[in-house]
Amino acid sequence: MGERVTVKDLAFDGLDRARFRSRLGACQQVFERMLAEDRFEKGRKLCGIELELVLIDAQGRPAMVNTEVLEQIASADFQTELGLFNLEVNMAPHKLVGTVFSELAEELRTALLYADQVAAPRGVRTAMIGILPTLDAAHMVREHFSADDRYVLLNDQLASVRGEDFQLRIDGPEPLESTFTTILPEACCTSVQFHLQVNPEGFAPAWNAAQAIAGPQVALGANSPFLFGRRLWHETRIALFEQAIDSRPAELAAQGVRPRVWFGERWIQGPAELFRENLTFFTALLPRLDAEDPEQALAEGRVPHLRELRLHNGTVYRWNRPVYDVARGKPHLRVENRVLPAGPTVLDVLANAAFYYGLVRALVESEAPVWRRLSFAAARNNLHAAARDGIGAKLLWPGRGQVAASELVLGELLPLAAAGLDKWRIDPNERDLYLGIIEARARTRRNGAVWQLEQVRHLEEKRGLSRVEAFAAMVPRYAELARDGEPVHTWPIG
């Protein structure tokens, strides 16, 4: 969905869809042939980070000014996201070795400082938070889509496929039930994505490992306890994203039709399976043909870009997404990890990254892979348990049964992550710095969601503020502490 499209591309008919389906089949065949013929780039162990941001005013309210801010930033590293109050910053790929996390942290701080300097004359700044609590249902109107036609196209196609309003039903201490005519509630979900370039033979183990640890990741990193004034899950973003762009009416959901935001249904043996599922289970939302014939490109010795396959893959929102891409004239594969919210601080983001990359490496090279000992259903259930209960969640893990997330991290996953970072040849000081933040977060049982909940409770009970007033006080304080940069487990309440 990163391609710019225009309203004229909405003129799809049955012939367009038939041609696109045929081209998708050709792309899949070419992709599988490239795998069989070992045509992919190997040996480049690269990582990358994409971070979504919200724009807020001095009162912590969403600022609908991303068009103006992006024009002033004038950098390809920054892009639009779905809502006018969103931005995304993309960090250049880095080799996963040495002091990579501190290098990424410094680049990210520089990018955020620049964005804030550009936005300041408008009384606006950026914030890294899973869901901005000051967003409300009144903001979820069509006029607040970003000024890029691809978002309206995506909305209209999803609405057409669904055939009825989008429904939100999220339980929790203050349950939410509402309907919306657009997918704009999805823009409330502000996340960070970790990319890992892998060899084709290493893709399935890396994807399986990432799926297995989705629950622990979310339990540690939860940062989205509020939505539309309600206290819901610790990581409400998971449930919100799953429902906000669900193209299935109730009847199709009851019949077992797969949702577009999807954990998956089994461990895999190779990357072709995931792309094949995309073709089998999901309607093409934007059936636009590229000029390139992938079969002809391959026959002529050129690298096929497989743009139809990539476009379709971009409208299937797996929590760990397969990525086919071409860089420097060479095709490669990546696992894109999408389960975590943004923030709260740069240090917290990079600590989450270190934990993820280290743990994936250790699990991939384990003699007894966890995905052979943990059912896929249990991994999926762990994700939702972690989203509901955050760092206090009980997770199922091989050899431990039901175990508290913090206990699992301290007793088993942190040592594995440290060993994995050693295998990546990460500098030991770097390893200890970032995993030390994860350890402290697990020991104190304090992440972004816990801080938000405690701060709002303090403002309501100790200072007598209403919920709206508490949000208006909490969000600027959150942004101030995030800018100071100390990890969230150290943040004071008050």
Image (cartoon, helix red, strand yellow):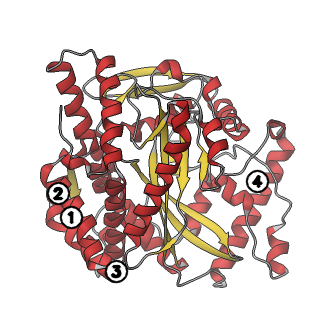
**Residue contact between numbered discs 2 and 3, judged by CB atoms under 8 Å:** no
**Residue visible at 42% across and 28% down?**
58
Q: Which percent across, then down, holds residue 234?
A: 29, 38
For the residues labelled 4 and 3, the Cα–Cα distance comes to 38 Å
Residue 365 badge: 3
Q: Which percent across, then down, holds residue 89?
A: 54, 52
Q: Which percent across, then down, holds residue 13?
A: 84, 39
Residue 436 badge: 1
Type of amino acid at the residue the image marks with label 1: Gly
SS state under label 1: helix
Type of amino acid at the residue the image marks with label 3: Glu
In the rendered image, which residue does mark 2 sit on? 440
Tell me the mark number nearer the camera, choosing from 1 and 4: 1
SS state under label 2: helix
In the rendered image, which residue does mark 4 sit on? 21
For the residues labelled 1 and 4, the Cα–Cα distance comes to 49 Å
- 107 over 155 or under it: above or below: below
For the residues labelled 2 and 3, the Cα–Cα distance comes to 26 Å
**Residue contact between numbered discs 1 and 2, judged by CB atoms under 8 Å:** yes
SS state under label 3: loop
